[in-house]
Amino acid sequence: MQASPRRQPTLDEVAARAGVSRTAASRAINDDPHVSHAKREAVRRAVQELGYVPNSTARSLATRRVGAVVLAVSSDEPTLFADPFFAEVTLGVSSFLEQTDLELILLLAHTPRGTERLRRILAARRADGLMLMAVRGEDPLGRLAEQTELPVVFGGLPLHGTPRWYVDPDNRGGGRLAAEHLARSGRQRIAMITGQVDLQASVAREQGFREALTLAGLPLLAVEAGDFTLRGGESAMERLLAAHPDLDAVFAAGDGMALGALRTLRHRGLRAPQDVAVVGFDDLASAPYADPPLTTVRQPVRSLGREMARMLVDVIDGRDPGSLILPTRLTVRESAPGADVDQAQ
C-alpha cells in the first residue's frame, strides 16, 4: 500500500516553532532588512527543522511593487480633505510623491465600511505602503497597522504605543509656547479648548500648556473639548464663558477652534484681545485674515505630509529612517499681542 504524501508545513507552523509572529516569519523568509538578527536566525532554524519550502507564487506576491501608497485618515467626515489642515498635509504628501513613480490613494477609514475597504487593500497588497493620520485611542486602524506586512508611517503619534516610523509636530512644546506667551502678557484667568480627548495631539498640547502654566504659578481655569472644528470652538467658548465669565485668555489647540472662539466672543460683545486674548495652534493660511488676526503656534503642516511621504519611500526602498519630530514656534498677531502692548486699549 502506497504511503500518502507528506503534508507540507505551513508558515504558521514555522512561526510557532521559531516563537515569532506570522508577520515576522514572513518578513524573515523574504529577506526583509527590518527583522532582527535573533528572529531571523530563529526562523531559519525553524525552516530547516520543518523542511518548509516557501511558495514561489506567494513569495513573488510578497516582494512585488504595485506603484501606489495609501494616505488613510481616521475620520468619517466626507469633507475632511477640504479641511485646511488635511488639505495642507495632502499637498505635502503629493509634492514629494511627484518626484517618484508612486500614485496616491486617499481613504477615509473611520467607519466600519472604510476600515474594511482599507483591510482589503492591504490584504490584496494593492499598495506598497501606508500613511495613517489622526489615529485615535482604540482605533481599528491601529490594529490594521500592526497586522499588515506593508510598511506603515504614522502622521502624529497614536494615543497608545510608539510605532516604528512616525512624523509628529512638537505638540507638547507648542502647548508650552502658548502658555508662556499668555503668562508673559499678564493674563491670569486662562482656559483651554482642546480637541478630541482620544487624540494624542490633544493630550500632548494640553500637557505642555498645563506644565508651562504651573511653572508660571498660574492655574488652568477650565478645559472644554471643541473637536478641532470651528463649530466646536464656538460651542466650547460658550460653555467657558457661561462657567467663567471673568476669564481673560483662551488657548485653542487648533486654529479652526480658535476662529470659532473669536466668533463667539464677537457675538457676546467681547473684544479680543482687550477682554479675552485668543491663541490658536497650526498657523493655517486663514490665521492672518481672522478678525482680529490670530496669534497661533505654527506647526509646519505641509512639511508633515512631505516628511511622511519621504519616510515611507525610504522604508519601501529598504532603508530604516529614524522617526521625526518637527519644531513648532509662536506667531504673534493681534488676537493675543505681547506683553509690551496695552491690553486695555
Image (cartoon, rainbow, N blue to C red):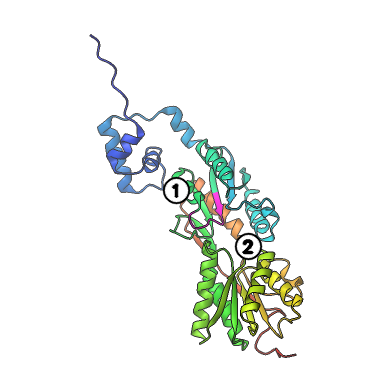
Residue 296 appears in view: no
The CA span between labels 2 and 1 is: 26 Å
Apparent side of residue 258 relative to residue 168 in the rendered image (left or right): right
Badge 2 element: helix
Q: Residue at x 61, y 86 (%)?
A: 187
Q: Check disc 2 and report the residue beneath it.
A: 301
- Look at the magenta stretch and give its main secondary structure: loop
Apparent side of residue 233 relative to residue 219 in the rendered image (left or right): right
Q: Residue at x 50, y 57 (%)?
A: 166
Disc 1 crowd rating (10 Å Cα; few below 14, some 14-19, many 20+) is: some
Q: Is residue 231 magenta?
A: no
Q: Check disc 1 and report the residue beneath it.
A: 146
| Residue at far left of view | 1
Which badge, 2 or 1, comes first in the chain's sequence? 1
Image location (x, y in percent) of residue 50: 27, 31
Image location (x, y in percent) of residue 97: 62, 49
The residues colored magenta run 131-138
Quadrant (top left, top right, bottom left, bottom right) of the N terminus: top left
Residue 2 appears in view: yes
| Residue 36 numbered tag | none
Q: Which residue is at the front of the view, 296 or 318?
A: 296
Q: Which residue is at the front of the view, 117 or 99?
A: 117
